[in-house]
Amino acid sequence: MVAGSGSTAPADLGVSELAAEAALLQARLDWFQTQLARLGERGPEAGSQG
């Protein structure tokens, strides 16, 4: 169920491990949203510039 966790089943994870995983996923989401916002600020013509 958890991507990239290897053979560890979700049932084997404790609350602290799940909280850490959630925090990591939230940080990744925040980073991607920041990158998307930066791309949006550049506008559609940014990709055509050399």
Image (cartoon, rainbow, N blue to C red):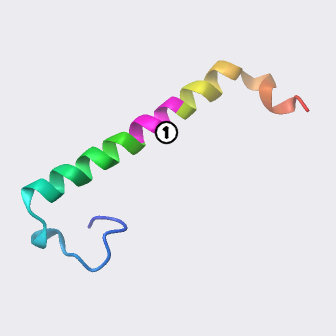
Is 33 included in the stretch rendered in magenta?
yes
- 8 left or right of 34 in image: left
What residue sits right under mark 1 in the picture? 32
The quarter of the picture where residue 29 lies is top left
What is the secondary structure assignment of the residue under circle 1?
helix
At which x and y percent is residue 49? 88, 28
Q: Is residue 40 magenta?
A: no
Q: Position of residue 43 (x, y in %)?
A: 71, 21
Residue extending furthest bottom?
7
Looking at the picture, which amino acid does disc 1 mark? Phe
Magenta stretch: dominant SS?
helix
Residue at (33, 48) in percent of width and height:
25
Q: Position of residue 4 (x, y in %)?
A: 37, 68
User: In the image, what residue occupies the spot 79% across and 26% down?
Assistant: 46
Q: Residue furthest right?
A: 50
Q: Is residue 11 left or right of residue 34?
A: left
- Please report the residue visible at 80 percent of the width from the left and 32 percent of the height from the top: 47
Residue at x-position 56% and y-position 32%? 36
- Residues shaded magenta: 29-34
> Taking 29 as reference, is 44 above or below it?
above
Are there few (<14), some (14-19), or many (20+) residues within 10 Å of tag 1?
Answer: few
Find residue 20 and report its horizontal and vertical position in percent: 21, 51
Left or right: residue 11 versus residue 24 is left
